[in-house]
Image: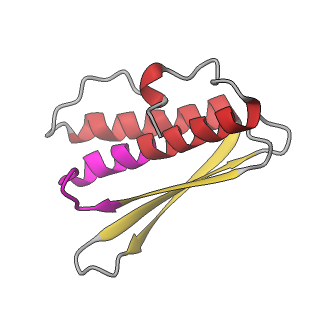
Amino acid sequence: MSRRQLKTDDEWGFLLAFWDEVRDIERDYDAVVTWDIRLSSKRGVISIHGRASGSDGGPLGGAVIHAQLEYPSASVARLHAALYAAGIRLSVAVSHEYEDKTGRAHPLATDESRKAR
């Protein structure tokens, strides 16, 4: 989880925080993370899709976890903030998958990355 102090107009900070979030998932859970952007059925709205694929011998046991976020939305009006929010959403989903598989929180998970379901 990024430890950066972010302000709404800090595009570079949000991009770095997104990058850090994705790399943390890949490193901590031995996963490959991919992203794609799809057109929503709503005109002018896109959907950001993340996918984390765990390795067979890794902590996720070969699971594939998905998360998506629509942009723009009532909660996210800037694209750089949407990318970071999507990264957080995928991180939380991966953390929950790990907990479901092992019955315990990942040792590197922070309280902020283990939000309520």
Q: Is residue 54 left or right of residue 18?
A: right
Q: Quadrant of residue 89?
A: top left
For residue 98: magenta?
Answer: no
- Indicate the position of residue 116 as horizontal and vertical percent values: 45, 34
Q: Is residue 1 left or right of residue 77?
A: right
For residue 75: magenta?
Answer: yes
Going 15% across and 38% down the picture, which residue do you hit? 8
Q: Residue furthest left?
A: 9
Using the rendered image of the protein, determine whether residue 1 is visible from the camera's viewpoint.
no
Say above or below: 104 vs 15.
above
State the count of labels. Answer: 0
Going 14% across and 40% down the picture, which residue do you hit? 9
- Indicate the position of residue 94 as horizontal and vertical percent values: 59, 41
Q: Quadrant of residue 60?
A: top right
Magenta residues span: 70-87
Going 40% across and 40% down the picture, which residue do you hit? 18
- Indicate the position of residue 85 as horizontal and vertical percent values: 35, 45
